[in-house]
Amino acid sequence: MAPITFRATLWMVFLIVIAGILIASLASYLVMGPVALLVILRGICTGLFYGMLAIGLSLVFGVMKVINIAHGEFIILGAYITYWLSTLFGLDPFATLIFSALALFFLGLIIGRFVISPALKGGIDPPLIISFGLSLCLANLMRVYWTATPRGLRLYLGGIPLPGGATLSVTHLIVAAAAIIGLTLLHIFLSKTYPGKALRAVSMDREAALLMGISSSRIETIAYAVGLLFAGVSGSLLSIVLSFDPTCGHIYLGKVMCVIVLGGVGYIPGAAAGGVILGVAEALGSLFFGDTVRDLVAFVIFLLILLFKPTGLFAKYRAF
Amino acid sequence: MVFYIFLLIVLLLLIVAPLVLGTVYWTTLLYTLLLHIILAESWNIIGGFGGQVFLGTAAFFGWGAYTSAMLYYAGVPFAACILLAGFSAACLAFILTPTFKLRGVYFVVGSLFISEIMKTIVLTLPIFGGAAGIMLPVFRERVLFTYYSAFLLMLVVFLITLFITRSKIGIALRAIRDDQEAAEIFGINSTMFKLLALVITSLLCGMAGGIHAFYMIYVEPHSFFSISWNIIPVFTVLIGGTSTIMGPIIGTAIYTLLRELFIFVTGEIYLTVLGALLIVVMLIAPSGVYPAFTKAIHRVQKRIR
């Protein structure tokens, strides 16, 4: 397994992304005034968080070649775990990250072992439909037991004053930092540990990995569990900054898919870059066209990218 | 011969049923059954015969409903409203042609977003009345009227499905489903046939939406572009068995029966039960209940001989 090579073109793409964001922010600063600065900064923070949302699904997709349609619902489940633990038991929201990570990891082990792994033998369609059934089950269970009331902690830990009178909430920065730490940890897991290396091997060539003595089905289960772990952790971060309700899982699935087609499957820097592009695009979209457009941006970018550049922006640079 | 007599009896019963039973509950139940059979059979054309897991039927359904509601206010008669609703939904399908560039899972997820995009468009543009939607006038015998329209549309759907299974279109679609590259090598224009299948599906879904608009009276984006209109056709066809005529009917019967039972017994939780059922069916019999059932019958027959 060759290490990820940072060739000149990769830096070019990153530079173009950064330059695009800078130009967009400058233009919107000229049009809208100082509010634009805050909006762009928040967009970048949310974008890094979107990268974190996406990497779990990206991992499962890379290994199993099947989209986990229930990923959005698992994110919302993670968000609920944090919300209930901190409102009912008074735990620190950031400490509950461990609980939601562990809970979803073991849930992932069980579902991956007993449901997804057996279904994978029947081709692509059965596991896809099964994940669809899972999303139906989860969304409805959460709606019935925890009601459809929008919830969220919306933590406020103080703000950083920006030029022009606006303040950037510290919580956003903490979430962005957490996302970067999470992505780095995943990178270390994939490049340094045995399960991580085996996981990359399985996603590159399942049969060859089998011949090298890697139990592919076990690795698929682990990949599913790690994918859900990331869904849980990012769901916890979601409940700290934003509000959520049981039925908005598929909106997050849309964002996640958009990030994946922007950044490529299983490429960690790509996920971060795709997330930032989406975050800034959403922020600018809702700044100029109103808040109803916000959720539409991800869908439109997803369809446009797939129609005009189906391989994504970072197709050459896959971690696996 | 026995089968045709049985079919005739069932059709006659369906014609007489609302007049004999008379109560609103039974007519409503039969109406929803017919509506879901229409949606399931029309999804079966693209999803079963064509093998494209298209999860965006709500876009056509809602678009058809909006078209017929708006045309009704423009003074167009009822029947023409429904026909034009189907036609406009088919136009929408034509616009969606580029989606066939997407392959595999991207197509599935992309189609899931089409209804979301349509919902947001209808919500934001002021012509469609925003979140308040459009209110249709209440007229007498509304339930019977929509029931018989749905009945006629169901007959049309069956004729179209029969035609597709017996014609070259069906063969081409099945070839694409089994192996798209191989079908293309044999000279089948896969994009054209898939588009044809999508247009037929959208036409029928749009007409179903047009009828349902008159049934519900109140057309608003959240209920007509609801994700459940994406889910239910797929669900019923997959449970019953894809690319058969009987499969979707059996799937719809199972769905309606379970829904009525669970709404009485467990209340709101019925969607969870249906999702769990979908998982179990996919694990045990990935091709659906009806094919598994016929296979079992064949096995029993062999053993008796």
Image (spheres, grey):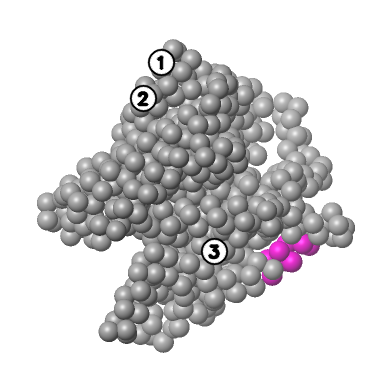
Q: Quadrant of the N terminus of chain B?
A: bottom left
Residue at label 2?
B84
At a point 58% along the width and 35% down the height, the residue shown is: B222
Residue A66 location, x and y as percent?
Answer: 43, 62
Q: Residue B77 is drawn in which quadrant?
A: top left
Instruction: Name which residue type carries label 1.
Output: Val
Which residue does the numbered mark 3 point to in the structure image? B277
Residue at 62% x, 65% y: name it: A229
* Residue topped by disc 1: B76
Asked if both marks, 3 and 2, belong to the same chain, the answer given is: yes
Which corner quadrant holds the C terminus of chain B?
bottom left
Q: Nearer the viewer, mark 1 or mark 2?
A: 1
**Element class at badge 3:** helix
Chain ID at mark 2 = B
Q: Amino acid at mark 3?
A: Leu
Q: Nearer the viewer, mark 1 or mark 3?
A: 1
Residue A100 lies in the magenta stretch: yes
At mark 2, the secondary structure is helix
Q: State which quadrant residue A154 falls in.
A: top right
**Which chain hosts label 3?**
B
Magenta residues (range):
A95-102
The residue nearer to you, when weighing A320 against B52, is B52
| Disc nearer the start of the sequence (1/3) | 1
